[in-house]
Image: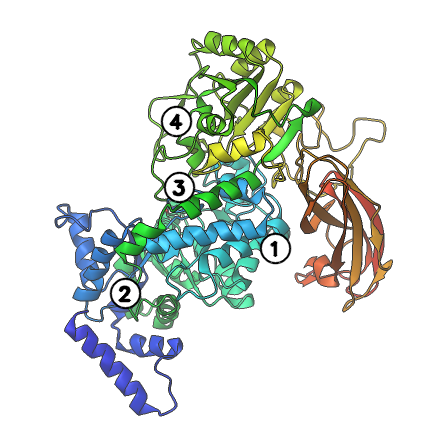
Amino acid sequence: MKTTAIAVLAAVMVALISACGETQPNDPASRVEALLGQMTLEEKIGQLNQYSNTFDITGPPPEDQVGRVRLERIRNGLVGSMLNLAGVEETRRAQEQAVEHSRLGIPMIFGLDVVHGYRTMFPIPLGEAASWDLEAIERSARIAATEAAAAGIHWTFAPVVDIAHDARWGRIMEGAGEDPFLASRVAEARVRGFQGRDLASIDTVAACAKHFAAYGFAEAGREYNTVEISENTLQNAVLPPFKAAVDAGVATIMNAFNEIGGIPATANSHLQREILKGEWGFKGFVVSDWDSIGELTVHGVAADLRGAAAMAIAAGSDMDMQGEAYISHLADLVRSGAVSEDLIDDAVRRILRVKFQLGLFDDPYRYCDATREQRVILSREHLDAARDVARRSIVLLKNDNDLLPLDATRGSIAVIGALAADKDTPLGSWRARALPGSAVSLHEGIRAAVGDDVEITYAEGAPLTVGERSFLHELTFNTGDTSGFAAAVAAAEAADTVVIALGEEAYQSGEARSQVDIGLRGVQQQLLEQVYAANPNTVVVLMNGRPLALDRMAANAPAILETWHLGSEAGHAIADVLFGNYNPSGRLPVSFPYHVGQEPLYYNAKGTGRPRSRGDVFWSHYTDAPNRALFPFGFGLSYTTFEYSAVELSADELAIGEELTVEVTVENTGERSGTEVVQLYVRDLVGSVTRPVKELKGFRLIELEPGSEQRVRFILTADDLAFFTARGRWEAEQGEFAVSIGPSSEELTEKRFVLTSGCEPSAQNVR
Ligand code: NOJ
């Protein structure tokens, strides 16, 4: 650290100790205040300024003007954070620029999108949510954090806690699906995993719940589109996972590109100041999304960047990602009296606090240990964990006549499809620093799993895409080349069984990957039909980042395995399930429609005033497709079977302060041991506002040996029944409830009870 910087910090500490005997100079709050007191207005605003790594910090000085200005600003203490740099060498060199050259030597905080792994890739988050296995999800985040921290990263822009109802939206792959209860539990697990018990530990990183808020509700599923939702939906469906993340101690929140009710999220005081920092008491900081402060001018709520800066800081956006708004205009806005310096101080305090918590002031290079980086990243232990989480994330959608599991000791298998040999697609989108093409392909996984007596042939059938495949560019799909069909059909005819991989390329879902059609792209459906005609013993292995409309496929293919984009060990994990070394236990965290026209489709919808036929056509339905999902939320098969007893309640009434026990017995009636995800749903029959037809309120994973059974007990209290009522508060309303338990949102047995205390649903429903 530069000598003057050390002298200033030392003077601050001495002043603190002598000024008041009882002050604890090591207490983070005091250290933050002491430092803040030393900072010029420009240095404070510098802490709110974040740049992406657009030049090679480890190389010669940048030649372009932007690069030169940025480097100068880092050296002048005018950059608080950088994103998109990684690796011990690169982060150390960048940190040196701030620590060694700037007056106060304040370390930068380095952020990266470590969404489902740093280099060892785990399943995409939607896939991982399909495991419903909170321990596995936490472990995955823990390993991602360990690898990222070993590569000099302090902060991940994850978890994505956006609820999404529309499969057309490509970023549905980044979240935990459509249900606020499941997504809240997953959010907590991910925050715990990333942040561990202590942010100061060397293997933890600060987490960032995003995108605040309602980003997943883009109209018509079109990326960055307008969001128009009611306060009711915002409070009951969108905010709960954010609240859960805050309660779990998430260090930061990222706001969103979208507007909501006419106010862009980045300029939204109601969200950021009233709810997040007010009602919820969030003490961390809010980072904007990429240039989302600048985009306030494009949205048309600010005339220029100066106005955008004033608006965003007032609304509670603490750090400006890549927007140049704060660094260019805030100082002048403060000096002219248009923005209070208190707002700046509050934002700086929040950011410095996280830096102190991470231990960056104790040693700004503590995350820069080349030996650790070498030892930790992509270790065998991490890969084994990735395989384990991956197989837990697989969902068996169909298995007629027990076609699966396959025999690994004899027979012949034709492996078909471009995705089956693809070593890149399983890494998924938002893959941090995964090595391109480093995943175990399905073909490799199958080969490794079978004995010498099994004959494996491979035929591509048809390429899925043509030309470049990248995060930054549009994909081009193969819509005409069927020249490989004949070989695929011949392979299918000659084999006992076919395993065909179909679905989506890695970058087909993710940011800016909205689609109006969610069927199989290109010539895949044609290929499937020809292969199936040649050999009906066809197992479809789906690889995709969003729910697909599989109506035509499901009508024929006897076995369908949903494998998402499963990460580094994808091929091994899928083979574990194909050959029965792992009995599939995943359950869908999103509804799979018959047809894209059903979107947005989600199980916890409202019933409407006309939910079913009264003998005529005048009810809420489509005339050409069912209302229900083809594969519903919570659904997934196993190689064994489970039977549920009737639901039993400890009482038929519940009052505030009391507990109601809800129990079932679940028996494994099949011939294999297996894991069942026992799900509990509640319906509030009459409310001050309309209530969903059912809502998940609990789930348990139980492992059962064949022939054994287990009593599964849930405890419900009035808190579980609370929602955002017509009075504008979270509270439970008295009246009748249906509680049901089963293996999916569609196969449930129900009991009724009455909540005898709480608000009256019929009371004043005017706010
Ligand atoms: C834009 C994305 O919306 C956000 O999720 C991500 O963290 C930033 N870019 C930084 O990569």
Distance in Å between CA atoms under marks 3 and 2:
26 Å
Distance in Å between CA atoms under marks 4 and 2:
41 Å
Tell me the quarter of the image containing the C terminus: bottom right
Q: Which residue is mark 2?
A: 364
Distance in Å between CA atoms under marks 4 and 3:
17 Å
The local secondary structure at tag 4 comes to loop
Type of the residue with mark 2: Pro
On the image, the x and y values in percent for residue 618 come to 78, 30
Residue found 70% across the figure and 22% down from its top: 401
Q: Which residue is mark 1?
A: 235
Q: Which residue is mark 4?
A: 475
Q: Is residue 204 above or below residue 380?
A: below
Tell me which label, 1 or 4, sits earlier in the chain: 1
Distance in Å between CA atoms under marks 1 and 4:
36 Å
Frontmost of labels 2 and 1 is 2
The foreground one among 672 and 536 is: 672
On the image, the x and y values in percent for residue 162 come to 53, 48
Type of the residue with mark 4: Leu
- Classify mark 3: residues with Cα within 10 Å, few (<14), some (14-19) or many (20+): many
